[in-house]
Image (cartoon, helix red, strand yellow):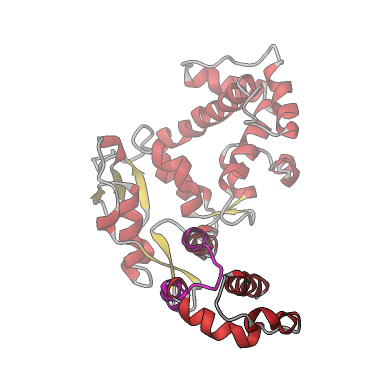
Amino acid sequence: MRVWIIFLLCLAGKALAAPTEDQPIVEEEPIVEEEPIVEEEQPIVEEEEEPIVEEEPIVEEGMEVGANPVQIETGEFDEAIEVIEDVVAENPCLTHHCKKGKVCEVDDSNSPMCVCQDPSTCPTSTAEFEHVCGTDNKTYDSSCHFFATKCALEGTKKGHKLHLDYIGPCKFIAPCVDNELSEFPLRMRDWLKNVLVTLYERDEDHNLLSEKQKLRVKKIFENEKRLQAGEHSLDLLAHDFEKNYNMYIFPVHWQFGQLDQHPIDGFLSHTELAPLRAPLIPMEHCTTRFFDQCDADNDKYIALEEWASCFGIKEQDVDKDLVI
């Protein structure tokens, strides 16, 4: 408004300063000092009103008086960005975890929920090793396709029995006989010990083991009596287990802790065993029978005591504190 009044004063001043034939206008100068602007304002504004009218349509378009059109456009653009960022930040699915075979969606109240994934949305496999075999003896294109299918059968008898059997397409696997079953833990124990030693050797920059685990494995690694990794006869493996029994206690406990994750409850379910047994079955045909035998009470779960007993660890050496 102050700018507007000054503008009117300037116009009034020009009108007063203009030479006219009627001298009485000059004599009325004292009236100007008493703010005659109101009286003189109307005729002057009416004569000079055209430029003002030209600016009025901008105000009618929703702009505030005195606003810069460029600033308004920038403001609208910034506001649009902020809205997008808010939507992304408020998407609850970004922090909501769903188990395999399910994907996260939001309901009408913007709350996250897990729903079964459509198998057709799974990526197509590009190699044979991506195929998996289910316990229904059916080959699935990938683990994604398998778990999506299992999810769709959730709540049914067929879905309850369906599990991932092993990695790779389904094939004939010879049955495991008794003498082969007794040999399986010999190779398995040696393999677990060598896996830990390898992790220890490569752990310098990768944090593959915790500090407590490193201390345990260091004793095995530095023991001169340790049987080096390689192909060994079953007799040698049996002899080494008897002579260096203490070297095998921690690896057996460590593997149990690696598998007991969903949830961490001191028991291994069929699903928790899958990361270990699925890759092994095509190479070790006694894998399934071995883990079935570990479940001594047939409750579908393998407790730490049952697990240790399967690998020949004595009852007095079973220690939950070693499951790091």
Range of magenta residues: 52-73
Q: Can residue 173 be seen?
A: yes
Quick check: 288 left or right of 242? left
Quadrant placement of the C terminus? top right
Placement of 28 over or under 302, stated as above or below: below
Placement of 117 over or under 47, stated as above or below: above
Instruction: Pick the residue in front: 87 or 12.
Output: 12
Placement of 10 over or under 144, stated as above or below: below
The answer to if 69 sits in the magenta stretch is: yes
The answer to if 224 sits in the magenta stretch is: no
Residue 219 pos. (x, y %):
74, 22
Main SS type for the magenta part? helix
Residue at 47% x, 53% y: name it: 271
- Quadrant of the image occupied by residue 124: top left
Instruction: Pick the residue in front: 108 or 193.
Output: 108
Q: How many marks?
A: 0
Residue 73 pos. (x, y %):
46, 61
Q: Can residue 98 be seen?
A: no
Residue 190 pos. (x, y %):
55, 26
Residue 194 pos. (x, y %):
57, 23
